[in-house]
Amino acid sequence: MALFMLGKVQRAASLCRPHIRSCRAYRITPQLVDDLRTLVGDCNISTANAVREQHGRDESMHSCQPPDVVIWPQNVEQVSKVASLCYTHNIPIIPFGTGTGLEGGVSALKGGVCFDLTRMDKILNLNTDDFYVTVEPGVTRKTLNAYLRDSGLWFPVDPGADASLCGMVATSASGTNAVRYGTMRDNVINLEVVLPDGRVLCTAGKDRSFRKTSAGYNLTSLFVGSEGTLGIITKATLRLYGVPEATVAAVCAFPSVQAAVDSTVQILQCGIPIARIEFLDDVMINACNKYNDLGYPVLPTLFLEFHGSENGVNEQVQQAAEITQLNGGSDFTWATDQEQRNKLWTARHNAWYAALALRPGCRGYSTDVCVPISKLPQIIVETKEDLITSRLTGPIAGHVGDGNFHCIMVLDLNDKEEVRKVKEFTDRLAR
């Protein structure tokens, strides 16, 4: 059976991924390449080493594992025909979006055919009355929101990178807005998927866009987060939201990790409908200051954002400020206009690159854990203590509003002792 991989397939993979390729049960012949060329056209296929290597890695530390062939399908019919051909010959296929993943999920561990879906980039069927839009897999989240700018609507799921929306579906992406608007799982209405043998499935029925259904199996949720293992997503119908009347962002520093995370839990317990609440520890805020030329205090910090009416936002801000001050937080540093807010959230989104810049020449290994909100203060404090005791570089940033945080390990892969210590640390963190 064909092998599908997209996104975070190797979330729990070993740090020491083997550099050798597993034995194959197939062979890419010149005739097969010609058959692929006939299906997609001469300008939409490549076997060049540079192209293959570009598609054999993402932003992670894992070594390049290139496919044998890269194709750029133009429509679902081509995806279906190529999938059917690969299925017949038992050839692995690997969907590829923008390559912004951090776990090596696009690595072609057994070679095969890579489906680069970036040329299927149409935005289809925007319905402003029913708040949905249908997109092809080459559309990224920034492209969609630019397209929606004059409609009064937007798509809020924001994992940081300008990822492809269907790739975000495949990995069930979260992001800074998840505390208010949910993850991709909460915002997908329907999917068009090409199955391993080339059949085309619409998970909620062809061209259907109902927000709720209780009839039949929930196939849409089955494919959200399936990471390419069940099929290639060729179309996604997504929920949209009205652009809020007022938006205000703020930064607040705290004397300790405990105080910052306690504030997060208390804000949520009070029912304040906060749109974003992000935690950065002192190491991460220092890295962001240096990388983005900012001047925030080098202390555990919360980035917050409030959405709503003018009066509603003012009330949210007042309640949140009272809570943070009771926990020893500083006065809010405000970002009220679009330019200031963009600068603040760009710094948060650049956290991965800011962390890598702490140790030039080293690589990053992303961890990703989620716990019940009530356990969040304990786990972050324990993680911070473990990092200090282990003498490891691992700045922490997280979508703490939904109990999720990342410890970005920066390590020298040539230092076997450091690699061993990082592996042991990440095992403890997962446990």
Image: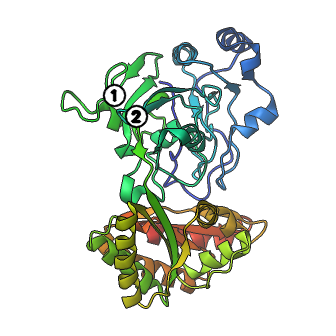
Residue at the extreme left of the image, as rendered = 214
Q: Position of residue 74 (x, y in %)?
A: 62, 19
Say whether residue 50 is visible: yes
Snapshot colouring:
rainbow
Q: Position of residue 80 (x, y in %)?
A: 52, 16
Q: Is residue 246 left or right of residue 146?
A: left
Q: Quadrant of residue 400?
A: bottom left
Q: Residue at x 58, y 64 (%)?
A: 337
* Disc 2 packing (10 Å; few <14; some 14–19; many ≥20): many
Q: Residue at x 54, y 75 (%)?
A: 334
Q: Position of residue 306 (x, y in %)?
A: 43, 65
Q: CA distance from mark 2 to mark 1?
A: 8 Å
269 lies above or below 20: below
**Residue on which disc 1 sits:** 209
Q: Label 1 amino acid? A: Ser
Quadrant including the C terminus:
bottom left
Q: Position of residue 372 (x, y in %)?
A: 31, 67
Q: Is residue 362 left or right of residue 385?
A: right
Evaluate if marks 2 and 1 touch, with contact meaning CB atoms under 8 Å apart.
yes
Q: Label 2 amino acid? A: Tyr
**Residue on which disc 2 sits:** 132
418 lies above or below 87: below
* Disc 1 packing (10 Å; few <14; some 14–19; many ≥20): many
Q: Quadrant of residue 280?
A: bottom right
